Amino acid sequence: MSEQGLIFTMRSYVSNNSSCGGAAVSPRGVSPCVDSPVRRFESLSISELARRCQVSTRSLRYYEEQGLLAPARNAAGHRRYEAKDADCVSFIQRLYGAGLPSDLIRTVVQEWKLPDSAPRIEALLRTRHAELSLEAEELHAKLTGLEAVLNAVTGNS
């Protein structure tokens, strides 16, 4: 897939499927997790962001621990999120849902911050796709073997 195709795909996914407020990705075609010259519309507490994104506050703290989110802190030390962080959470959830481990998600999110990152991100995701495909083939072989054993045990050859 070309760099523009990958960027378009990611932009389309986030803007069309964001469960966290529906804000679109920056017009530069970068990940919703990248700082961009977007005007601040509102500041959200961790509970407000969790409610908006339909995730637990524990998940948001975990994302922060993993280096996926970097909320600002107010004078009292409470986390404050920008509206764009809602899109980042949606993006992170999509990556987790696709079977990516935390370390790979961290790499993808960090790569988006770099110029011309789409080819590297594509390579990372294609590698993970190949790994999952191999796992699926192995599971299919195990299921076939189990079905053969079940048929032998039940007499349904």
Image: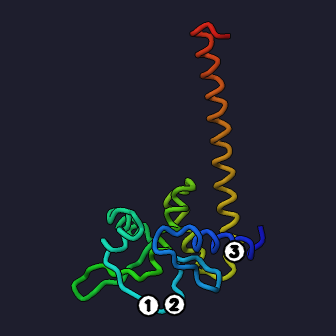
Q: Which residue is mark 3?
A: 8
Name the element at disc 1: loop
Q: Residue 105: image x %, image y %? A: 53, 64
133 over 82 or under it: above or below: above
Q: Residue 115: image x %, image y %? A: 66, 83
Give the mark, 3 or 2, whose residue is nearer the N terminus: 3
Q: Which residue is mark 1?
A: 40
Q: Give the amino acid type for the residue marked by disc 3 in the picture.
A: Phe
* Quadrant of residue 154 within the rendered picture: top right
Q: How is the image coloured?
A: rainbow
Which residue shows up at 69% across the image and 80% down it? 116
Q: Residue 18: image x %, image y %? A: 52, 69
Give the mark, 3 or 1, whose residue is nearer the N terminus: 3
Name the element at disc 2: loop
Q: Give the amino acid type for the residue marked by disc 1 in the picture.
A: Arg
Say left or right for 100 vs 46. Answer: right
Q: Give the amino acid type for the residue marked by disc 2 in the picture.
A: Val
142 over 14 or under it: above or below: above
Name the element at disc 3: helix
Image marks 2 and 1: residues in contact by CB distance under 8 Å:
yes
Kindly report the distance in space between the C-alpha atoms of the residues bearing marks 3 and 2: 19 Å
Instruction: For label 2, count other residues whose C-alpha is less than 10 Å away and answer few (under 14), some (14-19) or many (20+).
Output: few
Which residue shows up at 63% across the image and 42% down it? 135
Q: Which mark is residue 38?
A: 2
* Quadrant of residue 147 within the rendered picture: top right
Kindly report the distance in space between the C-alpha atoms of the residues bearing marks 2 and 1: 6 Å
